[in-house]
Image: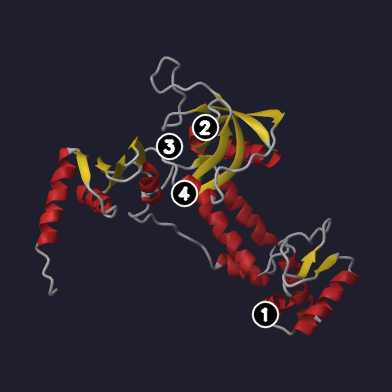
């Protein structure tokens, strides 16, 4: 009976994901027979869970609308996912350290002993790898405001902040007046939060860094527009003017590359800046722990480089070039 109850709870957890599950896949996930899965589905239906049967080649079972799951219904994998998420979230958002720790402690208290042991086995210490180009943690209030506006399709009035998070003075050259934007989608890439939005002030689609925005919610709704690309990930990664700024590194340099800005933006590491020069050229500014590190990253674009800055980067490129020319073909 205990095994049956445990299996039924796992089945309910799977169905609660909202997708349609083929019978064969449910049986594989639960490590039991299809006949047993059918019996467990009937058991749940007897408990007044509306489990729908979807017919056709892509058919299967799903939880009907209006159903609520029992509180804190986690299986083993979900418990581990929550433990990892709560321990890594503070690295990408301001002010979540204490809240995430308290949430994890609360979950430990109400979890069954087996799941609690699994969660406690994943006590993490997150170390930075020098190949990472981390973004600054984001203010949870700003992210909540943007996320709510996306979900409710509400216009935002957005002010644009400096890289350090301060508001430019109206007399400064980098000052931009507040824009009215339609927030459509949030994207996380290279530990940075981006907002895909239609800018009513400029009448065009833009990608904004959420940590560079000061959003003011409004009560005005907007109609959903056709998105600027079928692949939003490709759109974000190939948009060069998305508010990025060079990450803080011991060395920072730049070069003019013989590639379009959208191509450079697609492959440039997080924490770099791509500037459109013309249809066939772009300037890439990036940092690393050494001048040779920057030179090596620039070399991965496999194109001509001109106007390399500063002098230290030029010297590093020449040193690497000399080393490479001495490589013996025979190894």
Q: In which quarter of the image is residue 248?
A: top left
Q: Which numbered dot is residue 213?
A: 2
Q: Is mark 2 on a helix, strand or loop?
A: strand
Q: Does 40 appear above or below 141? A: below
Q: Distance between the residues labelled 1 and 3?
A: 46 Å
Q: Which of the two marks, 3 or 2, is nearer to us in this view? A: 3
Q: What element carries label 4?
A: loop
Q: Which numbered dot is residue 28?
A: 1
Q: Distance between the residues labelled 4 and 3?
A: 17 Å
Q: In which quarter of the image is residue 143?
A: top right
Comes first in the chain, label 1 or label 3: 1
Comes first in the chain, label 4 or label 3: 4
User: Mark 4 sits on what residue?
Assistant: 191
Q: What element carries label 1?
A: helix
User: Mark 3 sits on what residue?
Assistant: 241
Compared across the picture, whether 273 is left or right of 35 comes to: left
């Amino acid at each position: 009976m205990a095994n049956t109850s445990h299996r039924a709870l796992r089945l309910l957890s799977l169905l609660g994901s909202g997708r349609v599950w083929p019978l064969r896949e449910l049986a594989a996930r639960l490590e039991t027979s299809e006949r047993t899965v059918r019996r467990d589905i009937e058991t749940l239906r007897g408990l007044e869970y509306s489990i729908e049967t979807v017919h056709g080649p892509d058919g299967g079972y799903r939880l009907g609308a209006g159903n609520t799951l029992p509180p804190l219904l986690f299986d083993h994998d979900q418990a581990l996912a929550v433990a990892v998420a709560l321990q890594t979230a503070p690295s990408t958002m301001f002010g979540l350290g204490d809240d995430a720790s308290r949430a994890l402690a609360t979950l430990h208290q109400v979890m069954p002993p087996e799941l609690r042991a699994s969660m406690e086995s994943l006590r993490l210490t997150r170390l930075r790898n020098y190949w990472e180009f981390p973004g600054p943690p984001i203010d949870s209030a700003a992210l909540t405001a943007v996320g709510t506006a996306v979900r409710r399709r509400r216009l935002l009035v957005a002010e644009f902040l400096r890289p350090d998070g301060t508001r430019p003075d109206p007399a400064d050259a980098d000052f931009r007046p507040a824009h009215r934007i339609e927030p459509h989608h949030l994207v996380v890439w290279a530990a940075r939060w981006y907002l895909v939005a239609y800018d009513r002030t400029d009448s065009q689609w833009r990608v904004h860094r959420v940590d560079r925005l000061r959003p003011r919610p409004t009560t005005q709704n907007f109609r959903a527009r056709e998105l600027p690309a079928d692949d939003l990930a490709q759109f974000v990664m190939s948009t060069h003017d998305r508010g990025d700024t060079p990450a803080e590194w011991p060395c920072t340099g730049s070069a003019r590359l013989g590639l379009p800005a959208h191509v450079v933006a697609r492959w440039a590491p997080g924490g770099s800046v791509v500037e459109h020069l013309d249809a066939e050229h772009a300037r890439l500014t990036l940092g690393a722990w050494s001048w040779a590190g920057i030179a090596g990253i620039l070399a991965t674009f496999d194109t001509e480089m001109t106007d390399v800055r500063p002098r230290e980067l030029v010297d590093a490129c020449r040193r690497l070039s000399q080393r490479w020319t001495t490589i013996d073909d025979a190894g």
